[in-house]
Image: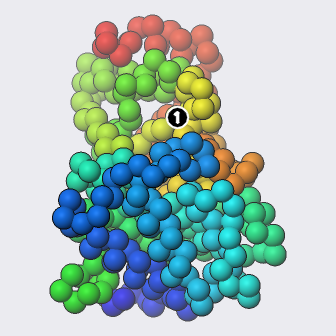
């Protein structure tokens, strides 16, 4: 990796970050070949939570796990594995990773990515990861899109490295994404509207009411169904992302994993000046009940995330009245 004028990566983290970059570079090359390469979008089974695994999910998981020997990582927890595995018995670090986020978009040539979080290891393999996100030393994501980039924080702001295909290395950009204070975009899967909790429906209704509604402005809606792509857009342009809990079986606590996705993203978002909550509580304060625990996730521009929280604070009768007056298809 080549650095701009910024400080070097913290010494204890350099080997693991370098290994992650090496694997990400290889994945970027593989993904960029599309149908000219192996059948990456083929279904090859299901992970521990019953989600369909694509060939690239398994390939990425095996590649990251295989690259970490000798990097100081003791424990490796992956969304694609049921249990934590030990890499280096004397390692001082623990890595949680979603090796390939957004794999359902592989065959559509949509940006996909890798999400990771690094924290100190304890002697308890699983217990290491069953702590709140305030233990994180670093987190970030690789995004495989028009550019392959690493966006990462070591707890002192956000940094961005771009994969230079000619130089065959990640080169630090002079600037890094920084969530703007204002934005007119929100991201949510509107097809699930009928299942959302009332505060979320009321918030979205008010956005959709536009300039004539209580917000007094028009909004644009975005939805890519790739968490890394959604995050990168918000890091660059601001706005808000919502994946709330809802009334469907299996979605009572949301759908995104706290350990592998939500806590790493929340750390990065906060370091960029934004906020990340469950709707009512800070994500980094949440303690996972088990390795693959899920949580609602709402993140983005700070004032927008705070506004959602106010809808949860309203009495149910008042939220119900808001919903009744401004339903999604009656705005």
Residue at 45 percent of width and 52 percent of height: 44
Which corner quadrant holds the N terminus?
A: bottom left
Q: Position of residue 99 (x, y in %)?
A: 47, 63
Residue at 30 percent of width and 20 percent of height: 209
Q: Position of residue 39 (x, y in %)?
A: 30, 58
Foreground of the two, 99 or 147? 99
Residue wearing tag 1? 244
Foreground of the two, 147 or 54? 54
Which corner quadrant holds the C terminus?
A: top left
Q: Quadrant of residue 80?
A: bottom right
Residue at 48 percent of width and 38 percent of height: 243
Q: Is residue 268 above or below residue 118?
A: above
Label 1 secondary element: loop
Q: Is residue 215 visible?
A: no
Q: Is residue 2 visible?
A: yes
Q: Is residue 100 above or below residue 327?
A: below
Foreground of the two, 160 or 1? 1
Residue at 28 percent of width and 35 percent of height: 221
Q: Position of residue 170 (x, y in %)?
A: 32, 83
Q: Is residue 262 left or right of residue 203?
A: right
The colour mode here is rainbow
Foreground of the two, 195 or 250? 250
Q: Quadrant of residue 50?
A: top right
């Amino acid at each position: 990796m080549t650095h701009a004028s910024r400080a070097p990566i913290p010494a204890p983290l350099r080997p693991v970050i370098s290994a992650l970059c090496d694997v990400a570079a290889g994945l970027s090359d593989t993904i960029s070949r599309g149908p000219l390469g192996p059948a990456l979008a083929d279904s090859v089974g299901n992970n521990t939570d019953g989600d369909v695994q694509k060939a690239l999910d398994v390939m990425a998981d095996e590649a990251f796990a295989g690259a970490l020997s000798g990097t100081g990582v003791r424990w490796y927890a992956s969304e694609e594995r049921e249990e934590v595995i030990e890499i280096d018995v004397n390692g001082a670090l623990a890595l949680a990773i979603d090796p390939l986020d957004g794999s359902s978009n592989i065959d559509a040539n949509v940006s996909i990515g890798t999400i990771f979080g690094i924290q100190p290891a304890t002697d308890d393999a699983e217990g290491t990861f069953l702590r709140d996100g305030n233990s994180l030393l670093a987190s970030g994501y690789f995004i495989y899109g028009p550019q392959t980039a690493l966006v990462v924080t070591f707890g002192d702001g956000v940094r961005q490295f771009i994969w230079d295909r000619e130089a065959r290395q990640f080169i630090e950009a002079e600037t890094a994404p920084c969530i703007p204070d204002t934005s007119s975009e929100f991201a949510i899967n509107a097809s699930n509207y009928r299942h959302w909790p009332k505060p979320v429906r009321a918030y979205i209704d008010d956005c959709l009411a536009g300039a004539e509604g209580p917000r007094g402005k028009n909004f644009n809606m975005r939805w890519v169904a790739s968490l890394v792509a959604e995050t990168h857009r918000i890091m660059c342009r601001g706005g808000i992302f919502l994946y709330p809990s809802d009334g469907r079986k299996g979605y009572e606590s949301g759908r995104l994993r706290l350990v592998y996705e939500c806590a790493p993203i929340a750390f990065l978002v906060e370091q960029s000046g934004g906020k990340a909550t469950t709707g009512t509580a800070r994500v980094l304060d949440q303690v996972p009940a088990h390795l693959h625990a899920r949580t609602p996730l709402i993140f983005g521009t700070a004032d927008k995330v705070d506004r959602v929280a106010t809808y949860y604070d309203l009495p149910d009768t008042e939220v119900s009245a808001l919903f009744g007056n401004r339903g999604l298809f009656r705005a």
